[in-house]
Amino acid sequence: GEGHAILLCGEPGIGKSRLAEAVRKTAKVSSHYLLSYQCSPHHTNSPFYPLIAHLNSASKLSNAVDDADREARVVALLQESLDTNDQDIAAILTLLGIADRLDPNLNPHARKSLIIETLVRQFCGLAKQRPVFCLFEDVHWADPSTLEVLDQVMTWLDVLPVLLLVTFRPEFEAPWIGRPGTTLLTLG
Protein backbone atom coordinates (compact mmCIF):
# COMPACT_ATOMS: atom_id res chain seq x y z
CA GLY A 1 0.00 0.00 0.00
CA GLU A 2 2.98 2.33 0.09
CA GLY A 3 4.38 4.08 -2.91
CA HIS A 4 7.90 4.70 -4.06
CA ALA A 5 9.64 7.11 -6.40
CA ILE A 6 12.64 6.20 -8.48
CA LEU A 7 14.61 9.23 -9.62
CA LEU A 8 16.59 8.19 -12.68
CA CYS A 9 19.38 10.61 -13.53
CA GLY A 10 21.76 10.46 -16.45
CA GLU A 11 23.38 12.24 -19.36
CA PRO A 12 21.54 12.50 -22.68
CA GLY A 13 21.66 9.22 -24.60
CA ILE A 14 22.72 7.08 -21.64
CA GLY A 15 19.52 4.96 -21.66
CA LYS A 16 17.04 6.59 -19.28
CA SER A 17 14.19 6.38 -21.77
CA ARG A 18 15.10 2.81 -22.69
CA LEU A 19 14.87 1.74 -19.04
CA ALA A 20 11.61 3.65 -18.62
CA GLU A 21 10.17 1.92 -21.70
CA ALA A 22 11.13 -1.50 -20.32
CA VAL A 23 9.33 -0.74 -17.06
CA ARG A 24 6.34 0.67 -18.98
CA LYS A 25 6.05 -2.55 -21.04
CA THR A 26 6.03 -4.60 -17.85
CA ALA A 27 3.36 -2.36 -16.31
CA LYS A 28 1.12 -2.64 -19.41
CA VAL A 29 0.60 -6.35 -18.85
CA SER A 30 -0.42 -5.91 -15.23
CA SER A 31 -3.54 -4.52 -13.59
CA HIS A 32 -1.95 -1.12 -12.87
CA TYR A 33 -3.07 2.23 -14.12
CA LEU A 34 -0.37 3.49 -16.45
CA LEU A 35 0.13 7.26 -16.53
CA SER A 36 2.83 8.67 -18.78
CA TYR A 37 3.95 12.29 -19.00
CA GLN A 38 6.59 13.57 -21.41
CA CYS A 39 8.18 16.97 -20.79
CA SER A 40 9.43 18.85 -23.83
CA PRO A 41 12.17 21.43 -24.48
CA HIS A 42 9.65 23.30 -26.67
CA HIS A 43 7.15 23.69 -23.82
CA THR A 44 9.21 24.70 -20.80
CA ASN A 45 7.11 27.88 -20.55
CA SER A 46 3.74 26.19 -21.20
CA PRO A 47 2.00 25.61 -17.85
CA PHE A 48 0.97 22.00 -17.25
CA TYR A 49 2.06 20.96 -20.77
CA PRO A 50 2.77 17.24 -20.10
CA LEU A 51 -0.40 16.92 -18.01
CA ILE A 52 -2.54 18.53 -20.71
CA ALA A 53 -0.97 16.33 -23.38
CA HIS A 54 -1.71 13.22 -21.30
CA LEU A 55 -5.33 14.24 -20.66
CA ASN A 56 -5.85 15.00 -24.35
CA SER A 57 -4.47 11.60 -25.30
CA ALA A 58 -6.27 9.63 -22.58
CA SER A 59 -9.59 11.32 -23.47
CA LYS A 60 -8.98 10.79 -27.20
CA LEU A 61 -9.83 14.44 -27.75
CA SER A 62 -8.32 14.46 -31.24
CA ASN A 63 -11.24 12.23 -32.32
CA ALA A 64 -13.90 14.53 -30.82
CA VAL A 65 -16.30 16.15 -33.25
CA ASP A 66 -17.24 19.25 -31.22
CA ASP A 67 -16.90 20.85 -27.78
CA ALA A 68 -19.84 18.86 -26.39
CA ASP A 69 -18.15 15.62 -27.47
CA ARG A 70 -14.82 16.80 -26.04
CA GLU A 71 -16.50 17.63 -22.74
CA ALA A 72 -18.24 14.24 -22.60
CA ARG A 73 -14.93 12.45 -23.21
CA VAL A 74 -13.19 14.39 -20.44
CA VAL A 75 -16.04 13.79 -17.99
CA ALA A 76 -15.96 10.05 -18.79
CA LEU A 77 -12.21 9.96 -18.15
CA LEU A 78 -12.49 11.87 -14.88
CA GLN A 79 -15.26 9.59 -13.64
CA GLU A 80 -12.72 6.75 -13.53
CA SER A 81 -11.48 8.45 -10.38
CA LEU A 82 -13.38 7.95 -7.15
CA ASP A 83 -13.03 11.59 -6.14
CA THR A 84 -14.61 13.43 -9.08
CA ASN A 85 -16.97 16.33 -8.41
CA ASP A 86 -18.37 19.22 -10.46
CA GLN A 87 -15.57 21.57 -9.43
CA ASP A 88 -12.97 19.03 -10.59
CA ILE A 89 -14.68 18.74 -13.94
CA ALA A 90 -14.81 22.54 -14.26
CA ALA A 91 -11.10 22.83 -13.41
CA ILE A 92 -10.03 20.20 -15.96
CA LEU A 93 -12.29 21.60 -18.69
CA THR A 94 -10.72 25.01 -18.03
CA LEU A 95 -7.22 23.54 -18.07
CA LEU A 96 -7.89 21.89 -21.43
CA GLY A 97 -9.46 25.05 -22.86
CA ILE A 98 -12.79 23.33 -23.55
CA ALA A 99 -15.01 25.44 -21.29
CA ASP A 100 -14.24 27.89 -18.50
CA ARG A 101 -16.68 27.03 -15.76
CA LEU A 102 -14.57 28.16 -12.83
CA ASP A 103 -15.75 31.02 -10.66
CA PRO A 104 -14.88 34.19 -12.62
CA ASN A 105 -14.05 35.94 -9.35
CA LEU A 106 -11.09 33.63 -8.70
CA ASN A 107 -7.75 35.36 -9.19
CA PRO A 108 -5.12 33.63 -11.38
CA HIS A 109 -3.24 32.23 -8.37
CA ALA A 110 -6.43 30.71 -6.93
CA ARG A 111 -7.34 29.21 -10.32
CA LYS A 112 -3.90 27.64 -10.62
CA SER A 113 -4.09 26.27 -7.07
CA LEU A 114 -7.49 24.78 -7.77
CA ILE A 115 -6.24 23.11 -10.95
CA ILE A 116 -3.22 21.65 -9.10
CA GLU A 117 -5.43 20.36 -6.27
CA THR A 118 -7.79 18.80 -8.82
CA LEU A 119 -4.99 17.07 -10.74
CA VAL A 120 -3.55 15.64 -7.52
CA ARG A 121 -6.99 14.58 -6.23
CA GLN A 122 -7.69 12.77 -9.51
CA PHE A 123 -4.32 11.04 -9.31
CA CYS A 124 -5.01 9.95 -5.73
CA GLY A 125 -8.49 8.75 -6.71
CA LEU A 126 -7.02 6.46 -9.34
CA ALA A 127 -4.44 5.11 -6.90
CA LYS A 128 -7.17 4.29 -4.37
CA GLN A 129 -8.76 1.97 -6.94
CA ARG A 130 -5.69 0.07 -8.04
CA PRO A 131 -1.90 0.54 -8.15
CA VAL A 132 -0.49 3.25 -10.41
CA PHE A 133 2.69 3.24 -12.43
CA CYS A 134 3.45 6.86 -13.27
CA LEU A 135 6.26 7.92 -15.57
CA PHE A 136 7.48 11.51 -15.79
CA GLU A 137 10.14 11.74 -18.48
CA ASP A 138 12.67 14.55 -18.91
CA VAL A 139 11.57 16.67 -15.95
CA HIS A 140 14.60 18.89 -16.55
CA TRP A 141 12.32 20.44 -19.22
CA ALA A 142 9.21 20.61 -17.02
CA ASP A 143 7.43 23.91 -16.53
CA PRO A 144 7.08 25.22 -12.94
CA SER A 145 3.36 24.33 -12.73
CA THR A 146 4.03 20.71 -13.68
CA LEU A 147 6.78 20.56 -11.05
CA GLU A 148 4.29 21.83 -8.46
CA VAL A 149 1.91 18.98 -9.33
CA LEU A 150 4.74 16.45 -9.20
CA ASP A 151 5.84 17.81 -5.83
CA GLN A 152 2.30 17.41 -4.47
CA VAL A 153 2.10 13.85 -5.80
CA MET A 154 5.37 13.05 -4.01
CA THR A 155 3.75 13.97 -0.67
CA TRP A 156 1.16 11.20 -1.15
CA LEU A 157 3.62 8.38 -1.88
CA ASP A 158 3.70 7.06 1.68
CA VAL A 159 -0.03 6.20 1.64
CA LEU A 160 -0.79 5.25 -1.98
CA PRO A 161 0.23 2.23 -4.09
CA VAL A 162 2.22 4.21 -6.66
CA LEU A 163 5.48 3.57 -8.43
CA LEU A 164 6.67 6.89 -9.76
CA LEU A 165 9.59 6.88 -12.20
CA VAL A 166 11.08 10.32 -12.88
CA THR A 167 13.85 10.77 -15.45
CA PHE A 168 16.09 13.81 -15.71
CA ARG A 169 19.55 15.03 -16.68
CA PRO A 170 22.27 15.80 -14.11
CA GLU A 171 21.87 19.58 -14.44
CA PHE A 172 18.36 19.33 -12.94
CA GLU A 173 18.34 19.65 -9.16
CA ALA A 174 15.60 17.24 -8.13
CA PRO A 175 14.04 18.57 -4.91
CA TRP A 176 12.85 15.08 -3.97
CA ILE A 177 16.31 13.55 -3.44
CA GLY A 178 16.57 12.26 0.10
CA ARG A 179 12.83 12.20 0.79
CA PRO A 180 11.44 9.06 2.36
CA GLY A 181 10.20 6.65 -0.26
CA THR A 182 12.56 7.86 -2.98
CA THR A 183 15.56 6.19 -4.55
CA LEU A 184 18.06 8.04 -6.71
CA LEU A 185 19.67 6.00 -9.48
CA THR A 186 22.41 7.74 -11.42
CA LEU A 187 23.40 6.09 -14.68
CA GLY A 188 27.09 6.22 -15.46
Image: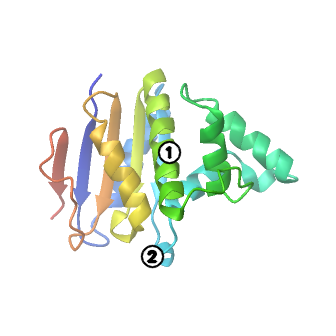
CB under 8 Å between discs 2 and 1: no
Q: Residue furthest right?
A: 65
Near mark 1 (Cα within 10 A), the count class, few <14, some 14-19 or many ≥20, is many
Identified by mark 1, the residue type is Leu
The total of numbered circles placed on residues is 2
Tell me the residue at 48%/22% (across/down). 129
Tell me the residue at 70%/43% (across/down). 74
On the image, the x and y values in percent for residue 25 come to 45, 41
Is 185 or 107 nearer to us in this picture? Answer: 107
Disc 2 to disc 1, how far (Cα)?
22 Å
Is 151 or 23 nearer to us in this picture? Answer: 151
In screen coordinates, is 145 left or right of 173? right
Secondary element at image label 1: helix
Q: Quadrant of residue 96?
A: bottom right
132 lies above or below 103 = above
Is 105 or 11 nearer to us in this picture? Answer: 105
Q: Residue furthest left?
A: 178
On the image, the x and y values in percent for residue 76 come to 71, 34
On the image, the x and y values in percent for residue 67 come to 83, 53
Identified by mark 2, the residue type is Pro
Q: Which residue is mark 1?
A: 119
In screen coordinates, is 29 left or right of 55? left
146 lies above or below 161 = below
Residue 15 visible somewhere in the drawing: no
Tell me the residue at 85%/47% (across/down). 68
Residue 80 visible somewhere in the drawing: yes
In screen coordinates, is 171 left or right of 149? left
Chain-order first, disc 2 or disc 1: 2
86 lies above or below 63 = above
Q: Which residue is mark 2?
A: 41
